[in-house]
Image (spheres, helix red, strand yellow):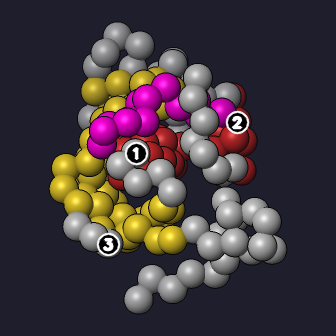
Amino acid sequence: MKSFGVEIPFVSHLGFTLHCMEDGESELRYEAKPEHLNSFAVTHGGASMTLLDVTMATAARSVTPDMGVVTIEMKTSFMQPARGPLVAKGRLIHRTATMAFTEGTVYDAQGKVCCHATGTFKYVKRLPVDGRNVNDLKVISTD
């Protein structure tokens, strides 16, 4: 298992694990806890969307790990219920100096596509908060 390079409390809470973050690609894994399920006993769509968001952001950051990214836009399509252990794969499709255009797909244990998303992210500099820790972000402008 690899490190995201920064502490992301919500990601830690959900239990996502990072398995690949290189050359514009990413792979995360996740198994929903009972409190992450919906009333149909499958992974809640919000948890799946968070998995896609983090997967795409990680793909964007893989080419510039010293930069952070913020989500500008995301479109998600759900194909079938997400059950059991999930694998999410992300890909950086195109980037400019300040923007990343990505896609991500979540697969179930049988390799079937559960959901797919495209996302646009803005690269932001990580700034020191207290002169010692460069991983924390100050309030940032997205202008």
For the N terminus, give its image quadrant: top right
Within 10 angstroms of label 3, few (less than 14), some, or many (20 or more) residues?
few
Left or right, 98 with respect to 43, comes to left
Question: Disc 3 or disc 2, which is closer to the eye?
Answer: 3
Disc 1, SS: loop
For residue 35, the mark is 2
Of 134 and 61, the residue lying toward us: 134
Position above or below: 143 against 34: below
Left or right, 101 with respect to 2, comes to left
Which residue matches tag 1? 62
For the C terminus, give its image quadrant: bottom left
Residue at figure coordinates x 32%, y 72% from the top left: 98
- Asked whether disc 3 touches disc 2, contact meaning CB atoms under 8 Å apart, the reply is no
Within 10 angstroms of label 1, few (less than 14), some, or many (20 or more) residues?
many
Residue at figure coordinates x 43%, y 29% from the top left: 20
Taking the magenta stretch, the answer to whether it contains residue 14 is no
Which residue matches tag 3? 98
As drawn, which residue projects farthest toward the bottom? 143
Of the residues under marks 3 and 2, which one precedes in the sequence?
2
- Asked whether disc 3 touches disc 1, contact meaning CB atoms under 8 Å apart, the reply is no
Residue at figure coordinates x 45%, y 83% from the top left: 142
Position above or below: 94 against 36: below
Q: Cα distance, mark 3 to mark 1? A: 14 Å
**Residue 129 percent coordinates (x, y):** 75, 74
Principal secondary structure, stretch drawn in magenta:
strand
